Image: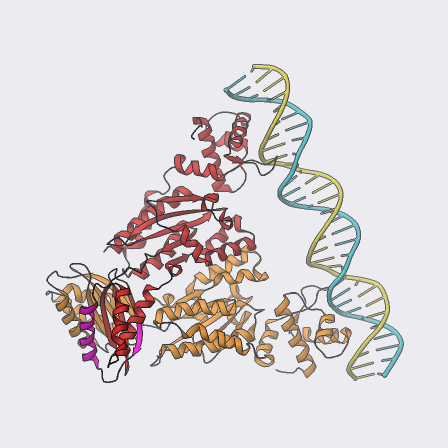
Chain colours: A orange, B red, C cyan, D yellow
Amino acid sequence: MVDLNQRKQLILQAIVEDYIRSNTPVGSRTISKKSGLGVSSATIRNEMADLEEMGYLIQPHVSAGRIPSDRAYRLYVDQLLREGMREEERESARSYFTSRVHDMEDVLSLCAQTLSELTRYTALVLTPRQSDLKVAALHLIPVGEATALLIIVTDTGMVRETTLRVSDRLNADSLFAISRMLTEKLRDLSLRQVQDMLYGYAAHGGADARVLSGIAELAGQIEKQTDTDRITVGGAHNILHYPEYADVARARAFMDTLERKESLLNLMRPQEGVAVRIGYEIGMKELQDCAVITAPYHMGRGHVGAIGVIGPTRMDYARVMDTLDLVSRELSAILSL
Amino acid sequence: MVDLNQRKQLILQAIVEDYIRSNTPVGSRTISKKSGLGVSSATIRNEMADLEEMGYLIQPHVSAGRIPSDRAYRLYVDQLLREGMREEERESARSYFTSRVHDMEDVLSLCAQTLSELTRYTALVLTPRQSDLKVAALHLIPVGEATALLIIVTDTGMVRETTLRVSDRLNADSLFAISRMLTEKLRDLSLRQVQDMLYGYAAHGGADARVLSGIAELAGQIEKQTDTDRITVGGAHNILHYPEYADVARARAFMDTLERKESLLNLMRPQEGVAVRIGYEIGMKELQDCAVITAPYHMGRGHVGAIGVIGPTRMDYARVMDTLDLVSRELSAILSL
DNA sequence: GTTAGCACTCACCTTTAGCGAGTGCTAACA
DNA sequence: TGTTAGCACTCGCTAAAGGTGAGTGCTAAC
């Protein structure tokens, strides 16, 4: 596959990097001067003709320079990449994560924003699947009369709440007692088990049927959380900075694609380490001019999610990959306490 | 102020509505045919010349039709508005709110999304100020060894959590006991009082100093929640549908403005009922081509927030105002249980 | 007060022409 | 055999030029 001699590789690398920077077709003269190879533009032209024949370069029209193909980006990512972040950038990126509370949901939505700010592209965050979560605790807290706040805490530290009407005979103390009892009964059961169990009880009637069915319902809502709710998008407007999207219709099409979260789910399927998909590799024709880079993160006891960045194929791969690697580590560290 | 005879009003109304629909300068012929007044275009031209002199219409150039000025929109909103939503639209808008859990934060972020979908403009949501919140309950829940999840519930039913390291001598039972004691001690105190009180205790040292200072810290974070965190923006990409923003630079400028939340705070200061600000009335030159419509919502015991919509001055005022009115009512109803 | 008629304006679209960055090819050179 | 200078050629881009038509203001008649 790598049938490229050293010089061709250097030329290709120079072209890719120049194009990533400038977004204009790269001419032979430019490369002759900047590559440092010390050969004339004519020589570069010959090499470029070869590279085009091999499928690494594309000529938009006869009298323009060349632009890299998906295949060129792929080679670039696999073999030609340099370090993408300077140490002080790394440091400042880390600092985003140090001083914050670690409430899982906040962290994740903050993460989408942070990633988009750090990379200047659009960020995607996939939260771990929640159907196999277990109950860690359950609390009923009085608010107003005859209403209580029901809180379910899962083993991942996720908190969900809803308000319930309860019998007005239940005061703070009895709610406290019920909470304790329920927590003991339901701890370590999966959400599904909780539902099954409680719908059974509730059917028998009794004083706190309302509470029990309320719990079952909330558990059901958490569990049935559709997969599409697991996707968060951050900084979609960042693409407006790139001339690829100077045409509003394109920008709108891109944003519309981001709205259809089902399709994003496929992009975000967690993989081993930082994964890059370029153009046609994504397998969605509405994203064929985009690249998607993802990285997994972990959340204690095997729950796994993913973070990612999406942008034009002309992406600053080195920087984005470094950033994702760093952020996914920080995230895993924070979420595992 | 309303020195317009009936015919001028009708003509102005026709112009505004045509322009809202078409976004092209409206000519006299169009109005002559569509207004139903049965007068010729020449007559309309005379009237339009008058309206222009009075500051209601603007002529982009000599040979174009007229477009409404901010002043025209103001008159339109104050006096010429018709019903904006059909009954079935109302019904479908309401249905957005019925079947959902009422977790305050979910409801509000969902609301931003819903509003932007309903109106096709950009939605803004301002959450009530949190500095004067009171503690309703406090819970410590074991997760893993020597770590616990701390949850603070406020009197508005808002829930905030963070993870803490705790002494490993504290098991589930003792955490439960501590929670109960703390809840009793701290209930109905303001977040500020809680901080003052606990920093005092924690300074004395003792076994659960870590817990106490953790609570103080979280209370501090909730309280010090910067005002800018109170703003949520939804559907910013909707503006890409409007030809006013066909130029990407404009779209980007708009989105950048939305990022600067401090300035949005001014726009969202809750007012009595549905409030409309048009163009120059907004008082921000980067939004001088926009209109902002807001409505307040209530959240039990006097906490008040606001929802709003922002878009080009050529906005479908009737529909948006109706929608905001409806949504703010629904929201208040849900949030007050 | 209303309307038909008319000269006039000017944004918008299309066409045309010129520029220049960049190419491929050829022939000469090391 | 690889490299390079030279040159004719291509073609997207920009600016200028011309034509079109929607819409106007004004005048004079009804």
Q: Nearer the viewer, residue A275 or A39?
A: A39
Q: Which percent across, then down, holds residue B274?
A: 35, 44
Q: Nearer the viewer, residue B277 or A305?
A: B277
> How many marks on residues?
0
Q: Nearer the viewer, residue A62 or B253?
A: B253
The quarter of the rendered structure image containing the N terminus of chain B is top left
Q: Which percent across, then down, holds residue B46?
A: 54, 26
Residue A97, above or below B57: below
Q: Which percent across, then down, holds residue B286?
A: 51, 50
Residue A135: tell me if it is visible.
no
Residue span colored magenta: B162-185
Q: Quadrant of residue A111?
A: bottom left
The quarter of the rendered structure image containing the C terminus of chain B is bottom left
- Residue in view at x 52 percent, y 55 percent: B253
Q: Quadrant of residue B131?
A: bottom left
Q: Which percent across, then down, holds residue A310?
A: 50, 68
- Residue in view at x 21 percent, y 63 percent: B188
- Residue in view at x 26 percent, y 80 percent: B205
Tell me if B13 is positioned left or right of D25 in this view.
left
- Residue in view at x 23 percent, y 72 percent: B139
Residue B292: tell me if it is visible.
yes
Q: Is B165 in the magenta?
A: yes
Q: Is B55 in the magenta?
A: no
Residue A279, above or below B251: below
